[in-house]
Amino acid sequence: MKAALPPVAVVIPARQEARRLPALLADLERAPWLIAERVVVDGDSADHTTAVAALAGARVIRAQPGRGGQLLAGIATTTAPWLWLLHADVRLPVDWAHHLQRALATPPPPRPEAWYGALRIDHPGLGYRLLERSVGLRSALLQRPYGDQGLLLRRACYAAVGGLRPLPLMEDLEFVERLARCGRLRGLGLALTVDARRWQRLGLIGTSLSNAALRRAWRRGSAPERLYEAYQNAQRRSMGSSSQP
């Protein structure tokens, strides 16, 4: 009997992630029976992101910087029936494959459905724990998980929602809002640990206020390209970052 092919294609948009990306790719190697494709979409990195991704056995493609466009470029190269969209600075828990398999075993739903992870920030402190709790409540009650929590869904569901938009900013929020209107988002039961740099550079309160202001401007019709430029300028004034809100 012919062995079943691994069902999941992982797509990772990256920029200047040579230090963090290898750890995620190593995490994914723990369950080769689940992961059919590991695609890293580089957004014009000036470091060794593409080299370390290729050395780890990932497929590397290049696209213009901007997470929405990078994700679209990566998804277009995959064929597996499931998609798992992950940020490059994420770490997975040791038992991630168990949680993923439970989601993969669910029968096809009558309406679009996706799964997300719980946010964990790689930094001690009560403020970070409170932020994690608030993100968990927002995700469950408002159906608004963001991209750094990962997004797992069937390719058919992705297509039914209309796919991602090539937005340089807010691509995750725009997509999950469309999905929530016609389907549902569910917790995977696993925590994704993300790098704390984004919150450290502007501070917890400063980052929260900045992100809230960007979301308000986006909802009022500001062009995503202008918001992306404003966000990048703010990050450069602190230390520079490839992360997005």
Image (spheres, rainbow, N blue to C red):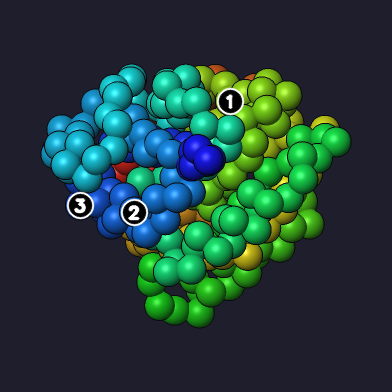
Q: Which mark is residue 129?
A: none
Residue at the disc numbered 3: 19
Residue 13 versus residue 73 in the image, above or below: below
Choose between 234 and 173: the one closer to the eye: 173
Residue 18 versus residue 101 in the image, above or below: above
Where's residue 225, x and y in %?
A: 46, 21
Taking the spot 49% from the left edge, 42% from the top edge, the residue there is 3
Near mark 1 (Cα within 10 A), the count class, few <14, some 14-19 or many ≥20, is some
Q: Residue 235: in sight, yes or no?
A: no
Left or right placement of residue 139 versus residue 32 in this view = right
Find residue 69 and report its image quarter: top left
Q: CA distance from mark 3 to mark 1?
A: 27 Å
Q: Which mark is residue 164?
A: 1
Amino acid type of the residue tagged 3 in the rendering:
Arg
Choose between 140 and 7: the one closer to the eye: 7
Secondary element at tag 2: loop
Amino acid type of the residue tagged 2 in the rendering:
Glu
Secondary element at tag 3: loop
Residue at the disc numbered 2: 29
> Which callout, 3 or 1, points at the residue further toward the start of the chain?
3
Amino acid type of the residue tagged 1 in the rendering:
Leu
